[in-house]
Every structure is written in C-alpha cells, then in structure tokens.
Amino acid sequence: MAGSNIKLLENYIDFLSQKNKVVTKNISNIGTANYRREDVNFKNVLNSQMAAKLKTTDSKHLNITPNTSVPFETIVDKDDTMISGMNNVDMDAEMMSLAENSLKYKFASRKIGRYYKTLQKVINGRG
C-alpha cells in the first residue's frame, strides 16, 4: 500500500471521527425542542480527492497526490418534519448511522494497522 493510500485512509478516519461526534450530538439532543439534526458533508472532500492532480514519478508510474487541506463541513438539516415530536432527529436512523460509522472506522484503522505491522516486519528483517 502506497503512502498516499495511507494518507487517504487517515483522512477517512478523520472524517469518520467527525461524523461520530455529529451523530452522537444528534442522539443526545433527541429531546431538545426545535433542535436541528446535523450531518458531515463529505461530498466536497470526495470531489477534491477525485480531482487530485496526477503526478508522474517515472514514465511508467502514476501517483495520485491527495489534497488534504479540505475541511469537513458540518451541515444543518433544514427538514421541518418533526420526527421525534420535538425535532427532526430520527433515533433509528441515527443509531443505524452510528453502527455503520463504527464498522467503517474499524475497517480503516485495521487497514492502517496492518500496513504499519508489515512495514515493521520489513524493517526488522522478518517480512
């Protein structure tokens, strides 16, 4: 796995951490009158990564240089449907999002961990 892929996974973990904070905030405010649920906008970050310039390091190789300067934008859901009776937070949807987010985080962190374990084995001469 190339260093740029590790950086992308690290950025993804940053996104998932931010998403986790926002989802838990939504869950904790389920009983707050007129609270508006929030979400994290990953679309701008994804578009930035997709538009990354291709940089050639050799005539036979291409390397994608990720743009890591795009922040994650927290957006407020302007839907006026009062799902919980007090605000627009749907507890079932938030719990599902939290579980999905947790699985994605575990996957990305394990991929990074395996990369560094492999790197350590190579450095120690066992790989």
Image: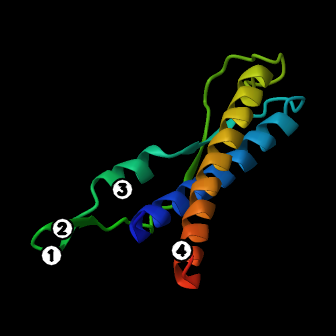
Which residue is painted at 20% across and 70% down in the image?
A: 55
Disc 3 from disc 4: Cα separation: 25 Å
Disc 4 from disc 1: Cα separation: 23 Å
Disc 1 from disc 2: Cα separation: 5 Å
**x, y (%) of residue 119?**
53, 74
Say whether disc 3 or disc 2 marks the residue closer to the N-terminus.
Answer: 3
- Nearest to viewer (mark 2 / mark 4): 4
Q: Is residue 63 above or below residue 83?
A: below
- Nearest to viewer (mark 4 / mark 1): 4
What residue does disc 4 label? Answer: 119
Disc 2 from disc 4: Cα separation: 22 Å
Left or right: where does residue 49 sit relative to residue 13? left
Which residue is painted at 79% across and 42% down in the image?
A: 24
What residue does disc 3 label? Answer: 49
> In the rendering, which numbered label is found on residue 58?
1
Q: Determine whether label 3 and label 4 are within 8 Å by CB.
A: no
Say whether disc 2 or disc 4 marks the residue closer to the N-terminus.
Answer: 2
Left or right: where does residue 46 sit relative to residue 96? left
Say whether disc 3 or disc 4 marks the residue closer to the N-terminus.
Answer: 3
Please name whichever residue, 43 or 124, is drawn nearer the observer in this view of the structure.
124
Q: Mark 1 packing: few (<14 Cα in 10 Å), some, or many (20+)?
A: few
Disc 3 residue type (three-letter): Gln
